[in-house]
Amino acid sequence: MRFILPALMLAAAPAAADVKVGEAGFVVENRAVAAAAPDAVWAALVAPARYWSPAHSYSGKAGNFTLDARAGGCFCETLADGGSVEHMRAVMVMSGKALRLAGGLGPLQSEGLAATLTWTLKPVEGGTEITQTYVVGGHARFDMAATAPAVGAVLDEQLARLAALFPKPD
């Protein structure tokens, strides 16, 4: 990513996420409602170039993100020099309902951590409730309790950007 961990911690706005820290890791949970049916939200969710913030990329371009929405598929980013980054790998894909990705995002990628990011979609009055849960555990060379709120803020931003693709009608 274009930032390093201290920059992430300083630049991230306070998270609206529910962050729980334990001895061996942390859990971040965010929720939002998108004013669209689950199938429309799903189509956007599996197209991260539409909503992922370029500030949280290696290339600085959201358009370089792709997601192969099948088990084993890559949430990847292409780089200008011909390189690429595998951010996460799909481990569960239930079209219109749930997506689970495994892997450490950003500065978590270089640590001895296991992490899963699960997105669930549930029809509700006025649209779709999106729940985003990121579970991280293992060994890191930094203070995970201090890092968890910044990770929560970054994930909250991605969720807010996804939900904003479907503005509520006036």
Image (spheres, grey):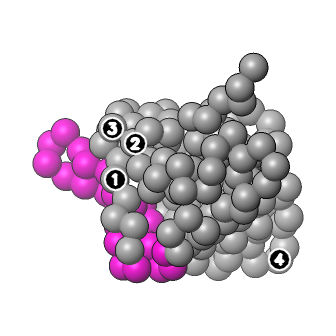
CB of mark 3 within 8 Å of CB of mark 1? no
Q: Position of residue 38 (x, y in %)?
A: 61, 56
Task: Name the amino acid, label 2.
Answer: Ala
Secondary structure of the residue carrying tag 3 is: helix
Q: Nearer the viewer, residue 121 or 87?
A: 121
In magenta segment, residue 16: no
Q: CA distance from mark 2 to mark 1?
A: 7 Å
Q: Quadrant of residue 74?
A: bottom left
First-in-chain label (2 vs 1): 2
78 in the magenta segment: yes
* Pointer 3 residue: 63
State the residue position of label 4: 23
Amino acid on which the number 3 mark rests in the picture: Gly
- The range drawn in magenta is 71-93
Residue at 85% across / 64% down in the picture?
A: 20
Q: Position of residue 69 (x, y in %)?
A: 39, 67
Q: Earlier in the sequence, mark 3 or mark 2?
A: 2
| Labels 1 & 4 near each other (Cβ < 8 A) | no
Q: Which residue is mark 1?
A: 66
Q: Marks 2 and 1: CB-CB under 8 Å?
A: yes
